[in-house]
Every structure is written in C-alpha cells, then in structure tokens.
Image: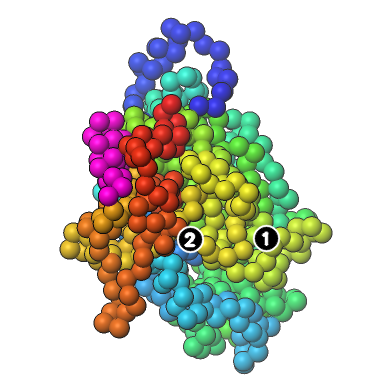
Amino acid sequence: MRPHRPHPRTPLLEASMRQEADHRVPVLIVGGSLVGLSTSLFLGRLGVPHLLVERHSGTSIHPRGRGNNVRTMELYRVAGLEDDIKAAASLLADNHGILQTPTLVGDAGEWLFKHIDPGGGLARFSPTGWCLCSQNDLEPVLLEGARRLGGDLRYSHELETFEQDGDGVTATVRDRATDERYTVRADYLVAADGPRSPVRSRLGIGQSGPGDLFANVSVTFRSKLLADVVGDRRFICCYLTDPEADGALLPVDNKEHWVFHAPWHPERGESLDEFTEERLQRHIRRAIGVAGLDVEITGKASWRAAERVADRYAAGRVFLAGDSAHEMSPTGAFGSNTGIQDAHNLAWKLAAVLDGWAGPGLLDTYDAERRPVALATSARASARSVEHSHPGFAPAPGIGGGRRGGILNVVLGYRYPEGAVVGADRSQEVVPDAVRLTGEPGTRAPHLWLRHEGERVSTLDLYERSLVLLSDGRSEAGWHTAARRIAETEGVRLVSYRFGADLVHEPEGTDAAPAPDWSAAHGTTLDGAVLVRPDGFIAWRTPSASPDPEATLREALKNLLHTA
C-alpha cells in the first residue's frame, strides 16, 4: 500500500476504536449518486459486503447526465442490468444526434452529428451500444440492483469524520433524520462524494487542470406546444445560438417535459437570484423562436463545468472515484462514464485483495490506470466543447485545444500502459488515434459472439468474477491444465476456457462470415494463451507454448496480482 500518516494514536486507543465501532464492513462507500451506486452494484456482484451513506434523502430528481456510453453499458450488461436500464430509457430510445440552430422555427441549423453509430459499425466492437438514460431514471435502477445483491444503502446519512490507521478506517456517520451518530469500521473507504469532496479535502489531495470552464442554470419546464415546434427532429440535445438567448434544449419525454441550460456568468458578477421565472421564460421563448410559447418552469439548479483531476486517487486505505477524482466538461458525457468505469476498476481489485488472492499492492494500480485516463479524457471533453461551441463556453487561450476527432477511441479504445498488466507497451498513448482492440495487454479484450453452455454470449460476458485464461482446445500447449491446477492449489479466482471446446463461435446468421480465428483476434496463436482481468482488460498474453506452462502462468499471475 502507499505510505500514509494517520493521526498519532496509541495502540491501545486504536484497538479500542476498532472494538467499539457500531458497524464492521469491508468497504464503506461515501456518496450515493451514479458512481457510488455503481460501486455498490459492482461490489455486490463480487460478493463484497459494504455500506453506502448518502447525505441526500434519495436518488436524483433532476434529468441530467443522460449519455451512457458503450463501455459503461458493457459493464451494466455484465452486471445484469442492461435490459432494466433500456426499459427505464425507453422514452428517449429514438433520440439521436446533436442539432445546432439559431432557433427551432423553420429548417435552419445543422446537425453536429445525426447518429452516434452511423452504419451500425459499433457492432464489430461490442455486444451493446450507447443508451440515453437520464440520471433520475438510471439511479433507481442501480439502487434496486444494488439492494437485491445485499448492499446496505442508507440515504439521509452523512459522513462526518474519518480516521485511518494501518488496518482500516474508522468513520463517524450522522443520521440526518434522527441526528443520531454511529461509527463504522471498514477495511477501505471509497469516496464518491462529488466535485467538492469533503473526503478529498480532508486527505489534503490537490487538483490540477484549468479549473472552472463555464456555468449554466439548468431549468426543467413543461410545454405542450414545444413538441409541435420540434417536429420529427429527435435530438439528444439542441444548441440554440441566438446571441441574446443562447442555450441548450434537451427533451425529457419528447412531449411536454423539457430541460434548458441557460448560460450563467458569475465571473461577470451575475447572481443566481437574477434568474427569475419571468427571465427564464423570456429566455427560453426567444431561444426557441416562439414568442407565445407556453413555458411552465418546474425546477431550477445551477452547475459549473470544470476541468480538474485529483493529484492522486488514493491515500492509504481511502480511494477517490468519480467527480471527487475528476471534473470534465459535459460535452460528450465523459465525466459520469469515466467515474462509473473508475468504480468498476476499483471494485474487482478490492474484491481480490479482500478475498486474499491478490496482494495489497494491486490497489496501487488503481491510480496508475485510472488517473491517466481521466487526464486524457478531460482534455478531450474540453476540446469537444470547443468543437460544439457549447453555449456559455468562451475558452481562455490554451483551454480546449486538445486533440479533436471521434470519441469511440476515447470511450472504448483507452488503454493501461502501466498498472495491473504484464507486458504492456509503455510507449503507447493512453487514448490512441483509433480503436484497436486486438488483444494487446492493457486494452479491452476483443468482442466475439460465442455459444457457451447452450447460450449465445459475447466474450465480454465471460469476464466479471474471476480472471479468465483463454486458449485453444485443439492445442497441446497445456495452458488449460496449468490454469486449473493453479486455481485449485493457490485459491486464485481463475477460470479457463478453450475455444473449440468450452467456447464455440456463434455465426451472425445463415450468410454469416466464417468463424473468426480467436487467436488472431487476440494477437496470439493456437498454441498461445491470453489472460483477461475481471474488468475485461487483457492482463497478459503469450504467442506460443511454454516448456513449463504452469510456471510461466504462475510468474505472470505473481506480477499481475502483487503476490510476490
């Protein structure tokens, strides 16, 4: 573990705190929004008992954070919630693209992009796709899923203080409904407590980056006539560019419920109090281009876009995830997705260490892997805002000038040159120019459709609760036997599958192409083997047989899991 300096205490006092704690759990999660709930879900899937505390009384009530990218949906698919999330998102299932126009009257304007997956090319890379599900619809699905798995999730409960020592973390939590306090003793604490994270502040962890980018006032409103103005333009978001009333319009149900983001300029001394109901109504009507439009304001909330990344993601036994670790411009929906993927990366590592089949050093790889991804992704998010001329964003020189282009390489093609990988090419960029999922260590494993135990599955569906070794059933290289022996004798969660035996290629249809060569798809040979992590990233691969496959595999596992 990374060295840390807890407050001085005597061994007797430390022992007393551990004994007197009201609750004892392996993991305490602070924050119950998207990232905290996802952490609970992923830990629950791995059988890790945990407690989540959230200061608010319930899940989000504001429709925001709606873009769930393909990588996030892969994680929710494996966690068994893909269908439930799609059902919750059904009202916006036909919405695609971003429109930019002076007003919505007439046919002016242009589509910045009209379809997120034109031509259906994404199917080559993934068994799922993007899903437009607002945070207020997604969080209840995650909450129900996490509780079904035994998660202890407590809303209106707030973390007040915490201290850590060499064996764990002792926290004081207040029940905001009763004002009662209780203590929790946990092996680890995960802070998913937002951009102004009290946990990060208490740890003294700084942040780097340009800082605040722009601010908006997000308005929910009802309008029965707006659907006729919008017509058949089923957009995800519409940027309205009237210089006197610019903003972003987002549908909630395509009928009468909408969201409008109005630029707010606190740097010019503009206060939130100036955004009266009358002003917002005038602004929305002018932006849309219909003076007499019915606009009933139903809610208002301010938010600030920023580009910041924490200088480190962990201190001792405390880890940062989501907005507490990074803030990103909202264009492209990178922020929430990056946070959910933080949670998934951390969850399997916590489970492996707590279960005893990995050493504590594995947890250091969380920072090594996820922080570079956040740095690259946050720069890409700011560049995307510049590309789209996001309302209210007037970037200072040097901000948002990062690499531009597509986003699939950012959301699906990112890699871990360092971390819990063996044999990764450290010279490679974290975010490449194109999506290259060819089995290289540190990249997301390739997707192939298979028949396994009578069911049609993706290779990605095999990765969640254990390490997975892939080899060929026609080979005599001995990788399958070696993996089974190690799993039986060492207690490592390791499952071995053989293509052509346990796994059979599943054609797409009667006219489908011949079965792909799994070994070529993974960058190896029929005598080689590929080790995949529980999060679906390639941990190690070898292109050929070994004189002693068991010893070779043991060495790879030792380096990967920090069990030396």
Q: Residue at image x 56%, y 13%?
A: 8
Label 1's element? helix
Q: Residue at image x 49%, y 88%?
A: 232
Provide the major secondary structure of the magenta segment: helix
Label 2's element? loop
Badge 1: few (under 14), some or many (20 or more) residues near its Cα, within 10 Å? many
Sequence-earlier tag: 1 or 2? 1
The C terminus sits in image quarter: top left
Front in this rendered view, residue 531 or 549: 549
- Scheme of image coloration: rainbow
Residue 22: % across, % down:
34, 24
Residue 196: % across, % down:
60, 43
- Gap between marks 1 and 2 measured at Cα: 25 Å
* The label number, if any, that marks residue 382 in the structure image: 1
Whether residue 374 is visible here, answered yes or no, is no
* The label number, if any, that marks residue 521 in the structure image: none
Whether residue 148 is visible here, answered yes or no, is yes
Q: Is residue 346 above or below residue 224?
A: above
* Quadrant in the picture for residue 245: bottom right
On the picture, is 100 further left or further right than 321? right
Query: Residue pushed farthest right?
Result: 397
Q: Is residue 421 above or below residue 99?
A: above
Image: magenta residue range: 476-495
Residue 562: % across, % down:
45, 31
* The label number, if any, that marks residue 437 in the structure image: 2
Q: Residue at image x 53%, y 60%?
A: 413
Front in this rendered view, residue 79 or 269: 79
Badge 2: few (under 14), some or many (20 or more) residues near its Cα, within 10 Å? many
On the picture, is 174 further left or further right than 515? right
